[in-house]
Amino acid sequence: MAGTAPVADTAGAGEASGAFLDVRDLKIHFPTDDGLVKSVDGLTFQLERGRTLGIVGESGSGKSVTSLGILGLHNKRNSDVSGEIWLDGKELVGASQNEVRRLRGRDMAMIFQDPLSSMHPFYTVGNQIIEAYRVHNDVSKQVARKHAIDMLGRVGIPKPDKRVDDYPHQFSGGMRQRAMIAMALSCDPELLIADEPTTALDVTVQAQILDLIRDLQQEFNSAVIMITHDLGVVAELSDDILVMYAGRCVEYASVDDAFHRPQHPYTWGLLGSMPRLDRERSERLMPIQGSPPSLINVPSGCAFHPRCPYAELNDGKSETERPELVEVEPGHKAACHLPLEKRREIWADEIKPKL
Amino acid sequence: MFAYIVRRLIGAVLMLLLVSLVTFGIFFWLPKLAGQTTDQIAAGYVGKAPTKEAIQDTKERLGLDEPVVVQYGEYLKALVVGKDYKAGPVTDHCPAPCMGFSFRSSQPVLETLLDRAPATASLALGAAVVWLAGGISVGVISALKRGTLWDRAAMIIALSGVSLPIYFTGLVSLALFSYSIKIFPGGGSYLPLTTDPVTWFQSLVLPWVTLAFLYAAMYARLTRAGMLETMNEDYIRTARAKGLPEKTVVTKHALRATLTPIMTVFGLDLGLLLGGAVLTESTFGIPGLGRLAIDSINTGDLPMVLGVTLITASSIVVINLIVDLLYAVVDPRVRLG
């Protein structure tokens, strides 16, 4: 697990560390008329080539904002991005827009949630892949077209030499997501961010797409960030899990740890929200009470305290002091005021038996 | 596709029939309903202090004594096969599509229309070029610079452009650029392109700009709104994620999608204008279809009014058909059939 563990920074601020992707204290804020929306508020993690990091959390926890931030897709006019993002030794937050643009698509690519709305309806699938390839590669249209057909074949589209001239609306949902993946991978990116790639698909297709992403990752040895609210997807694909709540990381662990020894009440809640068919109907779900906090008025102290069933056990500390993300076990971090022993006890006695 | 075009053409013919029926009804049937005798109607076409014979003659020539349905039938028949008019010993043959003769000038309506059409077409097409170029570029820049001083200024000017009537902006521009500063010739200086291209151009600059100002203002607002919406689309985010330069994102991806609905509006506007830009032509003294329509209405020249109406309706119908066919080319999701 050492490869993806958020070990203590060996490199100081403003220096490249050894990690392939190194996000340090990333903050993405949006000034609005109602106040400052702190979508991402101090996020730190690292990721190596060939590894997969799953970022999970509810809607509005800052997952997608983080991924768009790494790609530099936030409009500078309406957002404040601070912190550092190091990709293969290059810092991205302070880089010029043009530099980041050149990296987009070539060194880092993204697969979006809804492949129908994410592809231009007026251009053929082939044209859109050709365009993605030709921005970064100085080749003729014929060569790019061959490459596009090749890519479509690799992501499992039958008769790619015919389908290359189809429009997105002529593809089925699963096919479109495959085409989207082909487009993202057309320049062999070393970092692939998949933002809920299977949410819009039906379950049988979901499994195929996840398989495809895993196979391609092995083939290309790219680093993958899998953004999802579906813990099943994470369990299937990821090496590590980063649990986000209100723009911050509340728990970071290997998949094994996160599913078998989770250390944060919010992670317990997420696990409890997974339906289980092998339980009595009334016991299948244990939803987290309440709703995600407003990112303008993030609750004081621990942002999760208004929804946390164990907040009273901390003598008011939850309301006043923000828990730091500390390493509880090697490669396993959590941000919670509860004493570690108490957490292990609650997990073993109250939560685990019900899951 | 072929079946679609045929169906649309049949629809177009039915539409034109309806338009001609309504117009014909207004001019030949309503007066009867209002209690006018055919003598009174005929008298309107003969001049001051008409003689009995002249009225009788006119009634026979125009078939005013026939029931309105028969008159309308005759009118349609003339459109399809032509018609012979007997005037004393001479017989005037009016070949199809015959729209009859002007009550005033006795010229064939079609000939007059064809004579006037180039002036209107020059005005409408030239103005269209100006307003498309101006309106769309201002709209795009405003959308990209939303909320800036430029955007606000452009939208205020656009709002005034939409609100100010042509006979105001036209007269102001004439006063400024033709009478105070003598850059452009004054009203009524229009000459056909084939006669004198230089005068043709000079005399049309002010009308083009005046007419285009109104439309450019509308198109700037349309484009701005469309661009703002399109720039938030997921596929624009995808285009950026691919690493495309912003220029490509805006022109190839965003503008392309924004222009498609604008094309529909443009078809309607241009079709209407090709039937005569009444206010602009009157203000600048351009002898086009719009002026002809006004003059004909003022003098009660019914065949001419009917003719202009039919031409306007036809141009709207035809241009809309073209736009719908183009739509299928531009937006592959549209399948005609």
Image (tube, grey):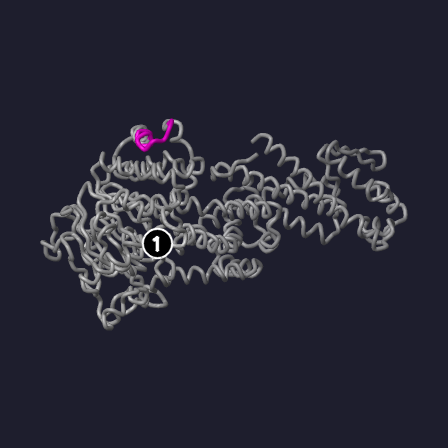
- One can see residue A270 in this view: yes
Q: Position of residue A36 (x, y in %)?
A: 31, 66
The answer to if A308 sits in the magenta stretch is: no
To which residue does mark 1 refer?
A: A273
Q: Please say whether residue A102 is visible from this viewpoint.
A: no
Q: Is residue B204 left or right of residue A128?
A: right
Q: Position of residue B89 (x, y in %)?
A: 85, 34
Foreground pick, B116 / B166? B166
| Whole-percent x, y for residue B294 in the image | 67, 52
Q: Pointer 1 indicates a residue of which chain? A: A
Which portion, as a residue range, is magenta?
A: A149-159
Q: Observer-nearest residue: B229 or A162? A: A162
> 10 Å neighbourhood of mark 1: few (<14), some, or many (≥20)?
some
Left or right of A329 in this view: B172: right
Along the line of sight, the residue nearer the viewer: A161 or B108 = A161
Quadrant of the image occupied by residue A209:
top left
Q: Is residue B75 left or right of residue B249?
A: right
- Mark 1: amino acid: Ser
In the picture shown, does residue B334 fall above or below B190?
above
Q: Is residue A107 above or below residue A269?
A: above
Q: Which secondary structure, mark 1?
A: loop
The mark total stands at 1
Q: Residue A25 at what x, y percent from top left?
A: 19, 58
Residue at x 59%, y 33% (from the top left corner): B4
The verdict on residue A153 being magenta is: yes
